[in-house]
Image (cartoon, grey):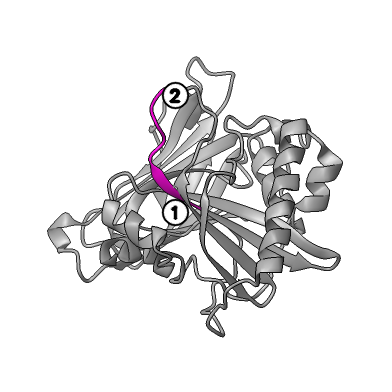
Amino acid sequence: MSFLIHFLRVLVILSGLAATAPAAVPAPVPPPLATELERLYAAWKSAMATRDLAAWSRTTSRARQMMVRNTIVSQKREWPRALFGLAMAPPEIRGLRLVGSQGLGVQARLVYHGRIDFELDDPRRPPDAVLVLDFVNEPGGWRFFTSRYFNFRDHPAESAAVARGDLGFVSVPPLALTGAAPVMPRPCPVPDYAAQIRVASFGYTTRLRLGEFHSDVISGRATTEVVQGGLRRGVTPLVLEVEPVDEVPAAERSLEVVVHALTPTLRTKSSAVFTYQPNNPVAPRHELRVIVGPSTLQQGNEGRLIPGR
């Protein structure tokens, strides 16, 4: 599983988990607790299906509630009305096999393997995949935190290893349990513009912060995310900290950042207000400014980049 483990070492998901190394080795979750957590997930899934806000709040960790709220507000959608407008139904765990579990501190995790059905209108048979469910023990009891889906369609050997109970791929940062409660985000205000940021970071580990609320770490992949906090009219600072990956030859490294402002007032639904593709070698730190105004909104990339230093 070396390829997958290397990939997951640099994969960062905006989960709010603490970034420190685990203080201890996770232990398997006792069977009675695993049963309790499965019932909790079923109750959370039912709350989503029935659009029951009170039940959703009872079963969802407080940090996750704020993360979801911030994402919806950042998209200029109405909170909490937009909460239940998901395109995909949460997957059913009945029919999946619980292949392992982990518990550390206030965190617990259940890992399932099988054909995961998101109830999409797709005639194809779902591939073997892995579903990871994370929970947090808060005052008042256990609460559901998040789920992660891993498609192993192109990695049959890794899929077979997980099916045998090998949880190595979730035991390395940033997926490794820390034992600590997730950090509670600050509530973000409604932005002037909803926005998306696309980062393609190959051969580099790129740590970025855009404005007050959005941060991420990307390495060896391309990702498109909702900008937490959105964009304001005028200037939003963007800081990139870039570190080369030693195993990747310099000629194969590339970095590109594109920020789109989303607005219904344009003829197109979005405008690329910022594009940055530095020349190699990439400097270790880039202080930039994303400018949103008539020029960048109407003419796309014109005036898109004003470097800091």
- Residue in the image at 63% along x and 32% along y: 86
In this picture, residue 226 sits left or right of residue 201: right
Hey, what amino acid is under mark 1?
Leu
Residue segment shown in magenta: 122-131
Looking at the image, tell me whether mark 2 or mark 1 is earlier in sequence order. 2
- Residue that carries the numbered disc 1 in the rendered image: 288
Image coordinates of residue 56 in percent, x first then y, are 78, 44
Hey, what amino acid is under mark 2?
Asp
Label 2 vs label 1: CA separation? 43 Å
Image coordinates of residue 295 in percent, x first then y, are 47, 29
- Residue in the image at 71% along x and 46% along y: 42
- Contact, CB < 8 Å: mark 2 with mark 1? no
Image coordinates of residue 222 in percent, x first then y, are 35, 47
Please say whether residue 127 is one of the residues in the magenta stretch.
yes
- Residue in the image at 60% along x and 47% along y: 228
- Quarter of the image for residue 47 reads top right
**Residue located farthest toward the bottom when viewing the structure as drawn:** 24
Give the foreground label among 2 and 1: 2
Nearer-the-camera pick, 61 or 299: 61
Image coordinates of residue 3 in percent, x first then y, are 27, 62
Nearer-the-camera pick, 98 or 293: 98
Does residue 74 lie above or below 210 as drawn? above
Nearer-the-camera pick, 254 or 81: 81
On-image quarter of the N terminus: bottom left
Please say whether residue 5 is one of the residues in the magenta stretch.
no
In this picture, residue 251 sits left or right of residue 187: left
Question: Does any portion of residue 66 appear in the rendered image?
Answer: no
- Residue that carries the numbered disc 2 in the rendered image: 122
- Residue in the image at 30% along x and 48% along y: 277
- Does the magenta stretch mainly form a helix, a strand or a loop? loop
